Image: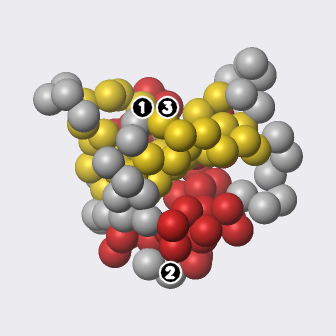
Amino acid sequence: MTFDEAVAGRVREALAETPDVVEKRMFGGIAFMVRGNMCCGVIDDRLLLRVGPDGYEAAQSRPHAKPMDFTGRPMKGFVFVEPKGFASAGDLKAWIARAIMFTLSLPAK
């Protein structure tokens, strides 16, 4: 798999003021780690978000979001968002904020 560099650039911009962000190749795309924990990423042209078990149902009920599924079994706490779901800068920032909020609740690695 690959990732869309333009989408990754938009994610970088959305994360610009977040401390301790590290990029890492993961899941065949690119992941953005916050304090050592996976927060979000880009696979193909889709946004991958870690929203946590408590935010999972609400996140996947949003338009253009669906469970993250690589192996035939969805990974609870992670969602994919299709490009239409983060077409505007505001939508992208809202999704990234959701992922950051969960990731910052985890202990740093």
Secondary structure beneath dot 3 equals helix
Residue 64 in sight: yes
Give the label on residue 77, or none.
1
Question: Which sits earlier in the primary sequence, circle 3 or circle 1?
Answer: 3
Question: Which sits earlier in the primary sequence, circle 2 or circle 1?
Answer: 1
Which residue is at a point 39% across and 41% down the rendered structure image? 28
Residues packed near mark 2 inside 10 Å, few (<14), some (14 to 19) or many (20 plus): few
Q: Do the residues labelled 3 and 1 touch (CB within 8 Å)?
A: yes
- Point out residue 103 in the picture as x, y percentages from the top left corner: 65, 34
- Point out residue 52 in the picture as x, y percentages from the top left corner: 49, 31
Residue type for callout 3 = Gly
Which residue is at a point 72% across and 58% down the rendered structure image? 15
Q: Mark 2 points at which residue?
A: 88
Q: Nearer the viewer, residue 56 or 33?
A: 33
Secondary structure beneath dot 1 equals strand
Secondary structure beneath dot 2 equals loop
- Point out residue 29 in the picture as x, y percentages from the top left corner: 44, 47
Which residue is at a point 55% across and 62% down the rendered structure image? 8
Compared across the picture, whether 63 is left or right of 92 comes to left
Q: Nearer the viewer, residue 17 or 1?
A: 1
Residues packed near mark 1 inside 10 Å, few (<14), some (14 to 19) or many (20 plus): many
Compared across the picture, whether 24 is left or right of 6 comes to right
Above or below: residue 17 compared with residue 33: below
Q: Quadrant of the C terminus?
A: top right
- For the residues labelled 2 and 1, the Cα–Cα distance comes to 24 Å
Residue type for callout 1 = Gly
